Image (tube, rainbow, N blue to C red):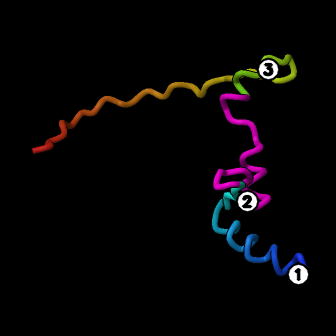
Amino acid sequence: MPPADDQIAPAAQAAANGPVVLTENGEPAYVLMTHEDYLRLKRPSIVDMLADMRPEADFDFEPPARQEIPDRKTPIDFG
């Protein structure tokens, strides 16, 4: 039997290009991915953060001040 590193290297190289789906009996069972991809997926989404009702998750939001658009004195010719 080859050493574990010899077996892992091809799978790790494939995972560097995107998730690798491992199957059992022809059905998807596991996904091999880079640690960076795993951390990105593990991070809560904006929906999760907005739905968090814990008091420590509360925050104040101040929208930026609205900026007025100056009146155009010269008409624009689109023709």
Q: Earlier in the sequence, mark 1 or mark 2?
A: 1
- Identify which amino acid the numbered label 3 is placed on: Asp
Q: Which quadrant of the structure image shows residue 49?
A: top right
- Judge whether 13 appears above or below 33 on screen: below
Q: Which quadrant of the structure image shows residue 51?
A: top right
- Residue at mark 1 to residue at mark 2: CA–CA distance: 25 Å
In this view, the mark in front (1 or 2): 1
- Judge whether 64 appears above or below 35 on screen: above
Q: Quadrant location of the C terminus?
A: top left
Mark 2 sits on what residue? 33
- The percent coordinates of residue 76 (x first, y second) are 19, 40
Segment colored magenta = 25-48
- Identify which amino acid the numbered label 2 is placed on: Met
- Identify which amino acid the numbered label 1 is placed on: Met
- Judge whether 57 appears above or below 28 on screen: above
Residue found at x 87% / y 78%: 5
Mark 3 sits on what residue? 58
